[in-house]
Image (cartoon, rainbow, N blue to C red):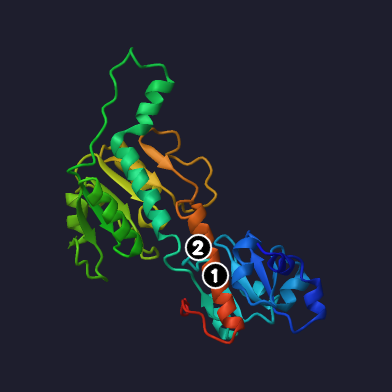
Amino acid sequence: MSASAAGRAGRAGSARADAERPVVVALGPVAPEHVVPYLPDDAIFVPDPSAGDLAVAEGAIVRAAYRLDRAALDRMPRLRVIARTGVGVDHVDVAAAHERGIPVAITPGSNSRAVAEGAFAMIASLVKGLGESHRYVSANEWGREPVPPAGDLHGLTLAILGYGRIGRIIAGFGRAFGMEIVVHDPFVTAEDAENVSLEEAVRRADALTLHLPGGGGELLPPAILRTAKPGLVLVNCARADLVSTETLVDALEAGVLGGVGLDVFSDEPVRDHPLAGRTDVLLSPHTSGFSAAALRATVRMAAEAVGETLAGRYPTFTVSDA
């Protein structure tokens, strides 16, 4: 970060005395060096805002865990733009923001490759049985018990539910490993893959990965999962409500599922998860999209959205009322 940029990152006390300098606040942890270069030269970025900073803030960069409701908006009467890092706005009162004429910007595509890599890494690890292999060696069973078998990715059918940016990247990964790709997405044209019904995707899959929005009830209830091939590997890096924990537990116990990877949970941070400790399960703390490159990209896009607004333009990517 340049000396001038460093000078613009910090407390906004001087900005309150100089109404001509716009204040941009971080709501949640945001590194100044990822933001300041993309803001107007006269803007002051406040990574740890006080109540006084919020009162004069014109832009806010909002992390996923921060809850921005009506009460929070009331504390920021001068706010002109909300820039959410990511695309989910579950914790942002979009309707209340729009009532105040505040656009809610998002950062689509900034972490697509990171999520795709995380999901495919889970698929590969579960198919290859790396969890059981690790336990086998760690428990000093090598040479005493039969070696656990490893699966093969080549020749398996990978079903991708949701064929947007993330799904298409995962399809490329799967093809590189010799997997057959089928997709289910009623809202897109999948020119490079067979787009089938949900029921057919589940029935044909050896591995299945979820990349659809939630909010519509359980996408994969027990009745649908029971039609799958025994030992299906299922990975969910999308929304926790797409398949319930109870469904996953029962399906694993019944042998319907042979492996589960989860990066999303109904309550976060999760405590004492029912699937914790199993060698056929991988749990990650909702971080598949938080690689170093993805974090830089999503914060940069949020800062650019704030900069657009402060310059008198409308942000490129915004959401409508929830």
Q: Is residue 222 visible?
A: no
Q: Residue at x 35, y 60 (%)?
A: 166
Numbered mark located on residue 277 in the image:
none
Image quadrant in which the N terminus is located: bottom right
**Cβ atoms at labels 2 and 1 below 8 Å apart:** no
Residue 306: image x %, image y %? Answer: 58, 76
Does residue 189 appear to the left or right of 167 in the view shown?
Answer: left
**Pointer 2: what residue?**
297
Which three-letter amino acid code belongs to the residue tagged 2? Answer: Ala
Does residue 1 appear to the left or right of 272 in the view shown?
Answer: right
**Pointer 1: what residue?**
302
Residue 161: image x %, image y %? Answer: 28, 58
Q: Is residue 145 visible?
A: yes
Q: Residue at x 35, y 35 (%)?
A: 280
Does residue 303 appear to the left or right of 160 in the view shown?
Answer: right
Q: Quadrant for residue 219, please give it.
A: bottom left
Mark 1 or mark 2, which is nearer the start of the sequence? 2
Q: Residues within 10 Å of mark 2 (few under 14, many from 20)?
A: some
Q: How many marks?
A: 2
Q: Please determine whether, in this image, residue 244 is positioned above or below residue 9.
A: above
Measured in 3D between alpha carbons, the distance from the residue under mark 2 to the one under mark 1, in whole angstroms, is 9 Å
Residue 286: image x %, image y %? Answer: 48, 51
Q: The residue tagged with tag 2: helix, strand or loop?
A: helix
Q: Residues within 10 Å of mark 1 (few under 14, many from 20)?
A: many
Which three-letter amino acid code belongs to the residue tagged 1? Answer: Ala
